[in-house]
Amino acid sequence: MSNPAPLPPETPAPPEAVPAPPGRSRVALFKRLADVVCLPSSRVNAFERSMTADLLVDMLRDAPIEDRTRVARRLSSLGEIPARLVRFLLRDEIEVAQTLLENCASLADADLLDCAKRGGADHRRLIALRRGLSDVISEALIEGMEPAVIEALLRNELAKLTNTAIETMVAATRDEPQFIPLLLRRPEMRPHHAYTMFWWCGPDARKQILQRFAVSREVLQEASADVFSLAAQENWQDPVSRKALQFIERRQRNRQALARSRFASLEEAVAAARPGLTRETAEEISYLSGLKPMTGAKIFTDPGGEPLAILCKATGLARAAVRALWQGLRRPETDEAGQPSPALARTLMVYDMIAVDRAQTVLRYWNWALSSAITPALLKAIRDGDEEAVDDYSAPQQAAMLVLQRDLSR
């Protein structure tokens, strides 16, 4: 019997193709499409670039965040990105938008406005840090009054701020005092902003305000020197010019009030206040100092004391008058350890450091804002808390609204 034929050697099965890692094609396609978007205009026209951007946006909608971040990073160095693509990426999670907001210098204001409105607080904070931020974007950023965003904006020395933006933030400092030092360093701040904010500032900020913003009126006095005689010839009948000239003139004390007063001088009225400042004496001191009682009341009730120094220096009272009024207000001259009161020491320091003319500027602006600018309509707006109508009023009236709103609403 014949032996069976030997079996042929087993042919090894062909090896199965090793599958490519999932997503490689997607990553490669994202890179290719981004490359097309990045091509110069000599290689791709606007229509082709726009069509590619549309396709890229459609893919990115379903892509994981890693892919979206990678594309954003690739596009951040471009001088021009199709609008639909850049807005899609700017509205994305902060991890995606961050690269563009931090590194892409070519973002248009329209794209940043869209991001500020549709993005979150982190998006707005990164926008606030951008160099050369326009005033339009700045105003949009402060609408929500988010502390982190406002702080970033105020720290950005290259951001432009409008007068409206500054006034909004000045008002916000009543509840957000951490903004005060940052605001005082802004070049857009003007004296009326600082004089208004003074009333709720701490000692250090008050000192800074008086050092930087207590300006002289010498230029105004020289420019209008001949107008005083013209107004006198008209018997001061024009209320518009009279109010302005009262702010400009050198004399602070009110001679007409002195003629009607029971005191022979302002010094005598202050001396009478030393045992205890009564309402009647406070009003007399106000009138003799060229102030309305409302302004005087604000000065005498201020817990810090610096306004007392301004009052005394502006009216030519001696340094001892500050201490006399301090005693009349029943304020302690020493602390619990028997040391001189820090508040009194600060008040006397303010008296020593400020010049008479500059003290008069501050005092007259307060009087202008807190009394002369008050009208029945403004009083109603203050009591009703109608801050939306702020643009209808002058700068002194706006200051009065900010300073007196809480006092009159109590």
Image (cartoon, rainbow, N blue to C red):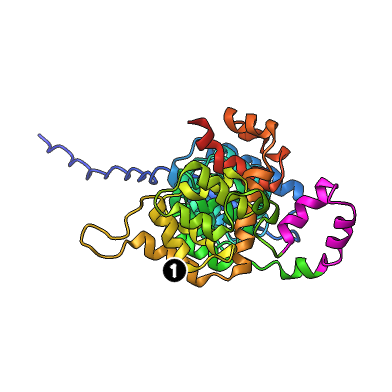
* As drawn, 366 above or below 40: above
Residue indicated by mark 1: 349
Is 115 on the left or on the right of 173, as rendered?
right
User: Residue 87 at x, y = what percent?
Assistant: 61, 43
Question: Residue 238 at what x, y percent from top left?
Answer: 85, 47
* Picture residue at 55% right of the left edge, 48% below the top: 296
Residue at the farthest left position: 1
Which residue is pictured at 64% across the width and 61% down the height?
361
Disc 1 residue crowd, few under 14, some 14–19, many 20+, Cα 10 Å: some
Quarter-wise, where is residue 405 in the image? Answer: top right
Quadrant location, the N terminus: top left
Q: Residue at x 64, y 29 (%)?
A: 380
- The span shown in magenta is 223-249
| Direction from residue 245 to residue 90 in the image, left or right | left
Q: Main secondary structure of the magenta part?
A: helix
Q: Is residue 227 part of the magenta span, yes or no?
A: yes
- The one nearer the camera, 27 or 171, is 171
Q: Is residue 188 visible?
A: no
Q: Position of residue 103 (x, y in %)?
A: 54, 60
